[in-house]
Image (spheres, rainbow, N blue to C red):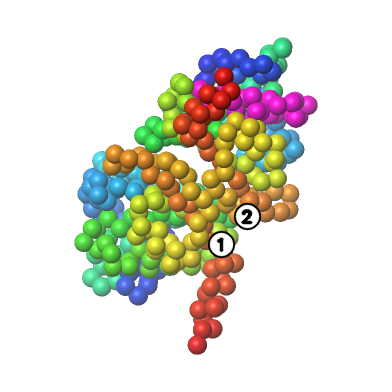
Amino acid sequence: MFGPVIEGERIRLEPPRPEHSAVYLGWLADMEVTRYLRERHPPTLRQDQVSLEKAAEDQHRVVWAIALKDGGKLIGGTLLEKIDWRARDAESGIMIGDKSEWGRGYASEVMRLRTEYAFQELGLRKVWTGVSLPNRGSRRALEKTGYRQCGLMRRQVFSHGQWHDVWLAEIHREDWERAREAACSAP
Amino acid sequence: MFGPVMAGAHVRLEPPRLEHAPAYIRWFADRAVTRYLRVRHPTSLKKQEEWIEQMAASPDDVLWAMVRATDGGLIGNVGLHRIAQRHRNAELGYVIGEREQWGKGCATEAVKLATAYAFLELDLEKVWATVIVPNEASRRALERNGYRQCALFRRDRYVEGRWHDLWVGEILREEWDALQEKTP
């Protein structure tokens, strides 16, 4: 499935479009962008469009493009995948592909919107993810969103000449609701 | 891929056969067998045979049939799945489908054989496995072979009216090597 439009303060999640593929290919060809990603090779334009069509049909995935609200520039993508409708959980993922937009806190905003959608619209109970340990930016953004560590897979991925541990974290709906109520009732 | 023959004291691992499909269907129709498995429904004979074919063709899986060493009777299966060629790890999974074979240490021996294969033949860096927490027998089979907890997902699986945590264990190659030296 493609995700619907969700507007935040500075960014907008929106359904991916075929014309995004060319930009994605550029990002996936950049080893700095993919350093901590599962996918580290660019597909062909045709392959990317086939996988986009597959994503549109997949009932266990919700995929968004990330655009800046101001001007509409495409800066990355995010998704909820492996949605288990019975256990009501999913794995989350994100890529800010446009390196000139790194370090501005956009990922935190995306995660906040995505988490709210997962709990409020999909009715999920929890969302989990794994992050390569040296990817501090992503980990901090997840912690800010309310994800908490639930494990550490040692030497799980190999990149840039070394083994890296993978930090596993999850966010439960009840914890998220409690934090939200506390924030709302704060003076 | 199908795994090659490996003989233990009580169980033997050997390549699965299409004739095993009806036994799989019977196991997956038994809720006591699937209680702590991810898949909890039987499928059609055609689909089950296709799955066995898929496993044979997949470069990311190694599947074995688990049979009794004494008479070759099929009792379950064991496999290395999601083999990450680049990151050199895999997930270990197993099922003892024949309930009268439970509690005899078959899983412990199968885990031992499959784990050794992962390190000695596939040259993996680690093997990991998940267990729904009340499934103590399964966790013990892993722990006896040196697997240690590396994660605990809270309220991860809904089984028989309750949420259960999911235990994740792993063993690194160097830890496995050290164990082999201790128990020659």
Res A172 label? 1
The residue sitting at 68% across, 34% down in the picture is: B28
**What type is the residue that disc 2 sits on?**
Arg
Name the image quarter holding the N terminus of chain A: bottom left
Q: Position of residue B111 (x, y in %)?
A: 60, 28
Residue A62 quadrant: bottom left
Q: Residue lying furthest top in this view?
A: B71
Neighbours of disc 1 within 10 Å: few (<14), some (14-19), many (20+): many
- Main SS category, magenta section: helix
The residue sitting at 48% across, 48% down in the picture is: A152
Res B110 label? none
The residue sitting at 70% across, 48% down in the picture is: B159
Residue A85 appears anywhere in the view: no
Left or right of residue B146, residue B85 in this image = left
Magenta residues span: B94-118
Q: Residue lying furthest front in this view?
A: B182
Q: Residue lying furthest right in this view?
A: B100
Chain identifier of the residue bearing label 1 in the image:
A
Q: Position of residue A108 (x, y in %)?
A: 38, 66
Q: Which residue is mark 2?
A: B155
Q: Are marks 1 and 2 in contact (CB under 8 Å)?
A: yes
Neighbours of disc 2 within 10 Å: few (<14), some (14-19), many (20+): some
Q: Is residue A30 magenta?
A: no
